[in-house]
Image: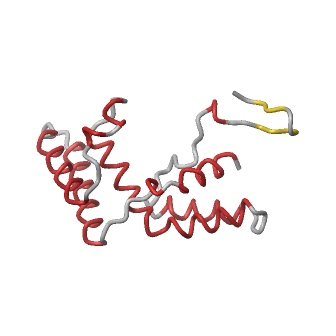
Amino acid sequence: GVALEAFHTRLLSNASALPLEEATLRRWGDAYEEAMRALGDEEKEADMVRINARLEELIGQAGAPPYKETQMEAEGGSELDYFTELLYRARLAPHRDELLRVLGEWLDGHVPLSKPLELVERLIDENVLQPDVLLVAPGDYHYHYNDDESYGE
């Protein structure tokens, strides 16, 4: 439940999703697959300058913040890492309202835990959500056994 609650909190932010037109989302998916193929080709070295330039162009066309202005650059993530994050946020956009509704119903006690878990699993299987979407950092687990005590980091 802790992971679903954390996911729900992230979804509440409008920044959790990046609405793109279907054609743009298809171009992004194609560019991502092309980059992955280039990186996986053991016969030749991937031209990261060309790949990054293409990704920056697509990001700019969509109006998303450029990589250079993001925290990901400061944390050592690559342009491809940033693009991948944006791609998953774009894939999430059409499903965000449904996820918020189902997670809200679960938090309110109207549906069992299995309902949001099934939806999240389906969206992972459909490559809408990243497989690690429900991972929570070890220090983020807080267990409340009564009003005065909290266990965990």
Pick the quarter of the image with the C terminus: top right
Picture layout, residue 100 above or below residue 138: below
Residue projecting furthest to the top: 153
Residue 148 x, y percent position in the rendering: 86, 34
At which x and y percent is residue 123?
51, 63
Point out residue 2 in the picture as x, y percentages from the top left corner. Answer: 69, 46
Image height of 27 relative to 86, above or below: below
Task: Report the residue at 35% width, 52% height from top.
Answer: 86
Q: Nearer the viewer, residue 33 or 84?
A: 84
Marker count (numbered): 0
Q: Residue furthest bottom?
A: 22
**Which residue is found at the position 26% from the left and 48% from the top?**
36
Q: Quadrant of residue 68?
A: top left
Q: Say left or right for 152 vs 7.
A: right
Instruction: Relative to 106, say whether 13 is above or below.
Output: above
Is residue 76 positioned above or below 116 on the image? above
The quarter of the displayed image where residue 108 is located = bottom right
In the image, 95: left or right of 141?
Answer: left
In the image, 26 versus 62, the foreground residue is: 62
Question: Horizontal placement of 5 versus 22: left or right?
Answer: right
Question: Please, which colouring scheme is shown?
Answer: secondary structure
Q: Residue at x 78, y 63 (%)?
A: 109
Q: Is residue 128 left or right of residue 58?
A: right
The residue at 14%/46% (across/down) is 53
Rendering coords of residue 100 (x, y %) = 59, 64
